[in-house]
Amino acid sequence: MYKRMTVLFCLMVAVAATLFFRLYYLTAGDSLSTAAKTQSSYTLDVVSERGTIYDRNLQPLTGNRERYIAAVMPCRQSLAALSQELSGQRREQMIESFSDNRPFLIEVDSPDIYAYGVDVFKSSERYSSPQLAAHIIGHLRDGKGAYGIERSYDEILSSCGSKVSISYAVDARKSPLAGVAPTISRNYSGEGVVLTLDKEIQQLVEEAAGYYIEKGAVVVMDIHTGDIVASASFPAFDPGDVSASMDAPGSPFVNRAFSAYNVGSTFKLLTAACALDSGISENLGYECKGYIEIDSVRFNCHKLTGHSWLTMQRAIEQSCNPYFINLGQKLDPARYLELCRAVGFSRSIRLAPQLSTSAGTLPSVEALQNHAELANFSFGQGALTASPVQIAQLICCIANGGSAVSPHLVAGATADGETLSQENPAAAPVRVISQNTAQILQRMMVATVEEGSGQNAKPDIGSAGGKTASAQTGIFLENGSEIVHAWFSGFYPAKDPKYAIVVLNEGGNSGGAVAAPVFRQVANGIQRLGKLS
């Protein structure tokens, strides 16, 4: 009897349990069905970067500053971990974000945060501070390229950068569902645009020139290819905080390396080239008395007592104005201007889409029929203007043996950040002066650095060739003094030249005093960096 009752009781318990679990299943099924209908995902774009801008050696010029972004699911563990990590404004931001009970992003200082609900990702700031080659790189406006290479290749750069997102399962109120791991999507990319700049030389130039130049520019160009390996304009602006530079003194958004200026005595090199190629001997002599008169117009030499008797080499060494005025009177204006244009004067160069150099100005053939106008032109004054890039073209032509090069800034693109693809080759050089003329001018320019007005440019190791210039502008300050631009332009090294280096100090007065030392610092740095091989 007792045994029968026990069996009956167990049967009743089993039936009751079956009914209970069936009822629970039906109820839970309804709840799960409802949850499934209301559940959705909430996605945070953690990393959304533009493609990288690289130098010639595929060293990144953008995205060099690491930063860490935490994707946070609000919960007790994530609150505790971040409370220890964050302080100040970030802590206040975190507390405010937690109150919404939705996943959020916040910048942190370390990747080493290990807690449930916290995922830390490495990202990067687009720009460094200061940013190398700011006038070349450019800047963004509302996430789009607004200036420089950023604008030139905005479509490419905006579509090929790294992307990282994280998705959370959330309810209808966007609150994360506990116990459901987030889904992470990673797409790291090395794609980008490759420039001809050399990051190390660019940094060297900006540091060396920054000490001497308040307003001006430095350009370093490969004499054989026209590759722009460094281009710096002063003052610079901060691409990461453009508004801070809007009202800054010195017009920091002007790219002075690409802008046209009075060039002064550097142009005597082209006058000499035209004369030599026209058959005039380098031994042509002239007696400098400190001035020369052309059609009753008096032109003074910078040495008012005169240089006495000199030939072309000494005239370049000492930068004698009357010598070159006299020489210029012997030249055919049409042929003179033809050579100017062949070298690169009065021509704007398109370096990239929507990025071009100033064309500068040349007088007309008709204007040069006036002997006084021709006199001004022959020593780099008057209606002549050119950019530092164009002066670098002139130096390249002399240093490479007589061939004109076209400035080249964009080397191509890369798909992986490791190899150059879609190469954009430089234009082939075109001979415009004889090799003999180029060699004579090289020798004269080396003598200028060794014994003449360019001695402050002499590097510590080896030598260089160069030419000083102090270019009058015809613009006067309130105190009555004229603004005079200081230039030094040359090649390095003297033997087997590799680079043209052009230094402009706006309003610097003396090229030999304030521009030549910058040339020397840059040449020394190039040697130190091992960039001559």
Image (tube, helix red, strand yellow):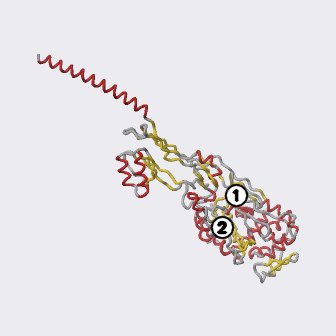
Contact between marks 1 and 2 (CB within 8 A): the answer is no
The N terminus sits in image quarter: top left
What percent of the width, then of the height, locates residue 226?
70, 58
SS for dot 1: loop
Which amino acid type is shown beneath numbered disc 1? Answer: Gly
In the figure, is residue 241 to the left or right of 454? left
Taking the spot 73% from the left edge, 60% from the top edge, the residue there is 358
Q: Which of marks 2 and 1 precedes in the sequence? A: 2
SS for dot 2: strand
Answer few, some or many: residues within 10 Å of disc 2's Cα (few below 14, many 20 plus, some between 14 and 19): many
For residue 356, above or below residue 210: above
Taking the spot 21% from the left edge, 22% from the top edge, the residue there is 13
What percent of the width, then of the height, locates residue 372?
85, 72
What percent of the width, then of the height, locates residue 52?
57, 51
The image quarter in which residue 248 lies? bottom right
Q: Say which residue label 2 marks.
A: 216
Name the mark on residue 226.
1
What percent of the width, then of the height, locates residue 88?
41, 58
User: Residue pushed farthest bottom?
Assistant: 305
